[in-house]
Image (tube, rainbow, N blue to C red):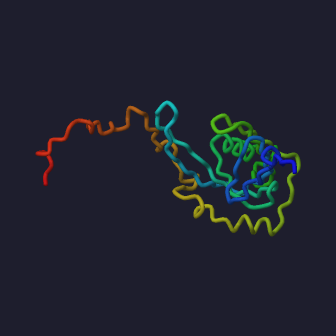
């Protein structure tokens, strides 16, 4: 019997979890239903050693592509595009009334996103709306606050020079047994 090379042709299923998850080449058709997203800020260490902040904005969305309610935890680039669409009179100045397509290209640090407004918005059904309403954004997104209370000017980006020095004790030097208190 000839061996089948399933590893080359296997298509992994899309993430069906509560949060929208992007891979290279993914396109999701979404309806954003939150105009006061939950904002979270987390520290991370960059490759150069500096400590920075990552700010995410969580929205409840209907994901037409997966046919389910989810949370879009978006960075500033996607969120600015959502805000631009929400403010644009040509789109009705209401993000809740338009459908968008978000496309991801690249992997990890090279990933880029494009956000497009679709020419015709679908009508959400009562069941779709109820499924979205069942998501408690404040409960699901821990340690966040609503955008209406978020003050980015109060966030402090810690630079490498601001970090307290690490313990520089030389643990490899010989131990004097008389220094041990017992």
Place of residue 89 in the rendered image (x, y in percent of width and height, measured from the top left): 78, 44
Q: Is residue 133 left or right of residue 42?
A: right
Taking depth in this image into account, of 58 and 164 the one nearest to the observer is: 164
- The answer, for residue 112, to whether it is visible in the render is yes
Q: Is residue 71 left or right of residue 182?
A: right
- The answer, for residue 115, to whether it is visible in the render is no
Q: So how many labels did they put on this image?
A: 0
Figure check: 94 above or below 134: above
- The answer to which quarter of the image holds residue 177 is top left
Place of residue 63 in the rendered image (x, y in percent of width and height, measured from the top left): 77, 56
Place of residue 107 in the rendered image (x, y in percent of width and height, measured from the top left): 68, 38
Q: Is residue 36 left or right of residue 130?
A: left
Q: Is residue 103 left or right of residue 162?
A: right
Figure check: 143 above or below 127: above
Place of residue 114 in the rendered image (x, y in percent of width and height, measured from the top left): 75, 39
Taking depth in this image into account, of 144 and 172 the one nearest to the observer is: 172
Taking depth in this image into account, of 15 and 5 the one nearest to the observer is: 5
- The answer to which quarter of the image holds residue 166 is top left
Q: Which residue extends farthest front?
A: 1
- Residue at left offset 72%, top offset 45%: 23
Q: Quadrant of the C terminus?
A: bottom left
- Residue at left offset 43%, top offset 34%: 159
């Amino acid at each position: 019997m000839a061996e089948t090379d399933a590893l080359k042709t296997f298509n992994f299923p899309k993430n069906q979890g509560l949060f929208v998850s992007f891979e290279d080449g993914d396109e999701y058709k979404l309806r954003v239903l939150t105009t006061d997203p939950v904002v979270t800020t987390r520290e991370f260490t960059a490759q150069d050693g500096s400590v920075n902040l990552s700010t995410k904005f969580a929205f409840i969305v209907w994901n037409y592509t997966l046919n389910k309610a989810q949370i879009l935890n978006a960075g500033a680039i996607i969120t600015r595009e959502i805000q631009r669409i929400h403010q644009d009179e040509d789109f009705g100045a209401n993000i809740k009334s338009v459908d968008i397509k978000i496309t991801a290209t690249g992997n990890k640090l090279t990933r880029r996103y494009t956000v497009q407004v679709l020419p015709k918005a679908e009508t959400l059904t009562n069941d779709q709306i109820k499924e979205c309403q069942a998501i408690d954004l404040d409960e699901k997104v821990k340690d966040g606050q609503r955008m209406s209370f978020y003050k980015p000017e109060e966030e402090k980006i810690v630079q490498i020079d601001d970090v307290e020095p690490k313990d520089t004790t030389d643990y490899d030097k010989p131990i004097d047994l008389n220094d041990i208190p017992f």
